[in-house]
Amino acid sequence: EVQLLESGGGLAQPGGSLRLSCAASGFIFSTHAMTWIRQAPGKGLEWVSSISNNGVYTYYADSVKGRFTISKDNLKNTLYLQMNSLRGEDTAEYYCAKICAAGDACDWGQGALVTVSS
Amino acid sequence: QPVLTQSSAASASLGSSVKLTCTLSSGHSGAIIAWHQHLPGKAPRFLMKLERSGTYKKGSGVPDRFSGSSFGADRYLTISNVQSEDEADYYCETWDTNFRVFGGGTKLTVL
């Protein structure tokens, strides 16, 4: 059974930093691209960032480019999202998701809440 | 990048059928999409991958009541014999190597 467990969420001040982790199990992590998706309060789903299976290629939404960094440790079966220069509009539930062969986000984690406030 | 358009709300009576629509923007009518179900406070759930041809592949454990179809730039999610547990937000998604895009979501109310 695929399991994706996010951690590292919490309260951060504007301009601050947080690092989210997503521990994966139940599938061969090194063979899958992964992605982060968020949902701000009262809003819909928004793509944040994706990474190739080997971690070489990374992609970002314009809203986070230059502030967030996605990475992947295939030995630890863990996905990361380093979030710097946080803003109020980054407040959201952050989900990690596994990308399947056709490109669809086919398994989701439970989410980690990030609140950016002074 | 494509834009996905969904109605903001829909309703269906218990035991009836409902068809949700996701419309791809001009120039992207051939795109494959995915449908996801999101209950408040829970993890989103992948329902299915849906191609332009109407061929769909469902995720593990998705009930037979859920099906997909396509017509032109429109991608549909049909829920037959609607149950109370189907009350949720439904999102369509499409992607390419360097981006992913979601529709605004449809809130389904079960009457």
Image (cartoon, rainbow, N blue to C red):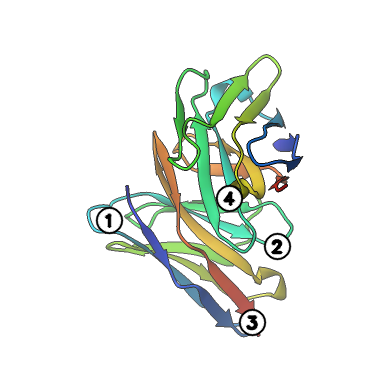
Measure the C-alpha gap from mark 1 to mark 3: 32 Å
The answer to whether tags 1 and 3 share a subunit is: yes
Q: Do the residues bearing badges 1 and 2 touch, measured as CB atoms within 8 Å? A: no
Query: Residue A108, how many percent across, how many down?
Result: 64, 44
Q: Is mark 3 on a helix, strand or loop?
A: loop
Q: Do the residues bearing badges 4 and 1 touch, measured as CB atoms within 8 Å? A: no
Measure the C-alpha gap from mark 4 to mark 2: 20 Å
* Front label number (1 vs 3): 1
Measure the C-alpha gap from mark 4 to mark 3: 40 Å
Q: Quadrant of the rendered structure where residue A79 is?
A: top right
Query: Residue A32, how many percent across, how many down?
Result: 55, 27
Measure the C-alpha gap from mark 4 to mark 1: 32 Å
Residue at mark 1: B29
Residue type (three-letter) at the residue carrying disc 4: Glu
Residue A47 is left or right of residue A109, and the answer is: left
Residue at mark 4: A89
* Front label number (4 vs 1): 4
Q: Mark 2 lies on which chain?
A: B
N-term-proximal mark, 3 vs 2: 3
Give me the disc on residue B15. 3
Residue type (three-letter) at the residue carrying disc 1: Ser
Q: Which residue is drawn at 29% across and 61% down?
A: B73
The answer to whether tags 4 and 2 share a subunit is: no
Q: Do the residues bearing badges 3 and 2 touch, measured as CB atoms within 8 Å? A: no
N-term-proximal mark, 1 vs 3: 3
Q: Which residue is drawn at 62% across and 78% down?
A: B109
Residue at mark 2: B40
